[in-house]
Image (tube, rainbow, N blue to C red):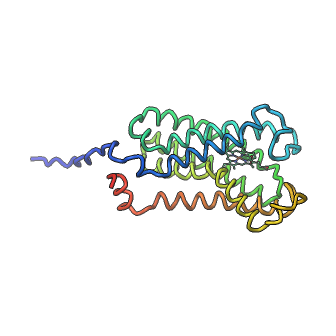
Amino acid sequence: MATDTTPTPAPARSPQRVRWWRRPWIAPLAIVTALFLATSLPRYVGLDPAQSLVPTDRGPAFYPALVTHIFTGSIMLSAAVLQLWPWLRAHHPRVHRWSGRVYVASAIPTAIAALIVAQFPSAGVAQQVANTMMGILLLTFTLLGYRAVRQRRFADHREWMIRSTALAFSIVTNRFSSTFLVAVYVPGALTDPSIQFGAPEIEGAAIASAWVSFVVNLLFAEWWIHRKPKKRARVQRGR
Ligand code: HEM
């Protein structure tokens, strides 16, 4: 008699078991993202280069690429927050799938436009290399994550998308790291009005911040992916 070797499926997890307060990061992440977009986006909506936070006299390709980058980047960050929201993933998988498609469709132009603006750095080659690497990695991780889900390799999909999202949020980390680096290494900038955007000290901090923000985010992503399974299972069981 043939033996049935079909593995017994694991018991389905109840999506309701994990309460929102077990995921204390999603509300702060949504608030920080909303604040970032509310403070960064408006100056570009009128398509007036004079309103830009960064100098735009860097050739005819720069400003169109910058605004494309910022508009698609805003869609990408909003979709990323929805993707990371466990309640939405568990209760509305169709919305999760659609916001995932929006994420991928906006991440690709964001990364390509970032690769263009990165070639006109305000702070030299070290900044150019950091942003170019970030753009290439964002594109690569997103495409690998998309390919994995098309091939139904869900574990690989999750890992690549966590890495992609970590890079997407490096712009938000950058706001904190640049403020921190200026405060610690160029404290004079806080009191001396002559030390402004373009001053060598500020450019040094901008370069350091470009590297710090994405390296720290990627390290965090690797930690998140490789957290001890025991800990993860406990969270999933809602304990
Ligand atoms: C890995 C991803 C990213 C890369 C490589 C990247 C790269 C860049 C570069 C090179 C610039 C021009 C900076 C300069 O030379 O002055 C820039 C500016 C900007 N990017 Fe991104 N970026 C990324 C993600 C994002 C995302 C997701 C957003 C969300 C909206 C975003 C929003 C902005 C904004 C608002 C600016 C204008 C300058 C500022 O306000 O800081 N970026 N980005």
| Left or right, 199 with reference to 176 | right
Query: In the image, what residue occupies the spot 48% across and 45% down?
Result: 148
Q: Quadrant of the C terminus?
A: bottom left
Q: Residue 137: image x %, image y %?
A: 63, 52
Q: Position of residue 77 (x, y in %)?
A: 60, 42
> Where 46 sits versus 180, above or below?
above
Residue 116 lies, with reference to residue 133, above or below; the image says above
The image quarter containing residue 213 is bottom right
- Where residue 224 sits in the image (x, y, percent)? 48, 58
Residue at x 50%, y 42% (from the top left corner): 83
Q: Between residues 131 and 191, which one lies in front from this camera angle?
A: 191
Specify whether residue 108 is in view: yes
Q: Viewer-proximal residue, 93 or 184? A: 184
Image position of 212 (left or right of 59): left
> Number of numbered discs present?
0
Residue 68 is left or right of residue 166, and the answer is right
Q: Give left or right: position of 16 versus 220.
A: left
Q: Nearer the viewer, residue 161 or 181?
A: 181
Note whether residue 136 is visible. no
Nearest to the observer: residue 40 or residue 128? 40
Q: Residue furthest front?
A: 191
Residue at the bottom extreme, as displayed: 185
Q: Furthest-left residue in view?
A: 1
* Residue at figure coordinates x 68%, y 59% from the top left: 177
x, y percentage for residue 88? Answer: 44, 38
